[in-house]
Amino acid sequence: MTRRQYTAEELAWIKANQADMTRQQLADLFSAKFKRSVSCNAISLLCIRKGYKSNAEAWNKGMAPTGTPFKKGHKVRSQPVGYECLRSNGDIYIKIAQPDVYRRKKFVVWEEHHGPIPANHEIRFLDNDKTNCDDINNLICVPRDISVNVNVHNPADTDQPELNKAIYLTEVLKREIREALKREKDNLKC
């Protein structure tokens, strides 16, 4: 789609005459004066691009609002609680309440089996398949800092769930060792 080209004379005429008439009137007069057919839509888009404001009265000024676009008894399309959908980020979401309260399914499944997720923790998939939420053995709850370390230093992105679990648990063990050594060092300073 190419943009319509206007001469400097045409643009000057549109700018001078656009303020006091509707866009349809402007398009009709433009077509008659310059002997070329221009639609109302083309004139409207040009005026929008140029930032021209019309002082012409709106066609529906003073009319009462007509009400809602819905007929009496119209039911809004809504999914039932428990409905699952796959979002563009690859995660499965499950509807947990009305009207539209959704939550990641991995969180819901984890909390059914183990209770609330601790603060600063996240749920990861051992087989790296975001759609495999139903198997609780595929989910692991790890601290966020461990998850970051794993992502940066030793990605747990293999196709072997046991190896991925070992990588996460090794990072947790390393953190526990660092904290124990730090506590011991602090105790020796006292």
Image (tube, rainbow, N blue to C red):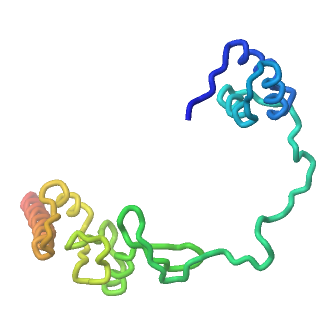
Residue drawn 84% across the image and 25% down it: 29
Along the horizontal axis of the image, is 8 left or right of 127?
Answer: right
Task: Look at the picture and state if 46 lies above or below 60.
Answer: above
Along the horizontal axis of the image, is 59 left or right of 167?
Answer: right
Along the horizontal axis of the image, is 51 left or right of 58?
Answer: left
Q: Residue furthest top?
A: 9
Foreground of the two, 119 or 140: 140
Query: Where is residue 106 drawn, in percent x and y?
Result: 34, 76
Foreground of the two, 109 or 159: 159
Residue drawn 18% across the image and 58% down it: 149
Query: Where is residue 141 drawn, in percent x and y?
Result: 26, 74
Task: Look at the picture and state if 3 lies above or below 132.
Answer: above
Residue drawn 38% across the image and 76% down it: 105
- Image quadrant where one finds the C terminus: bottom left
Q: Which picture quadrant has residue 116?
A: bottom left
Q: Which picture quadrant has residue 18?
A: top right
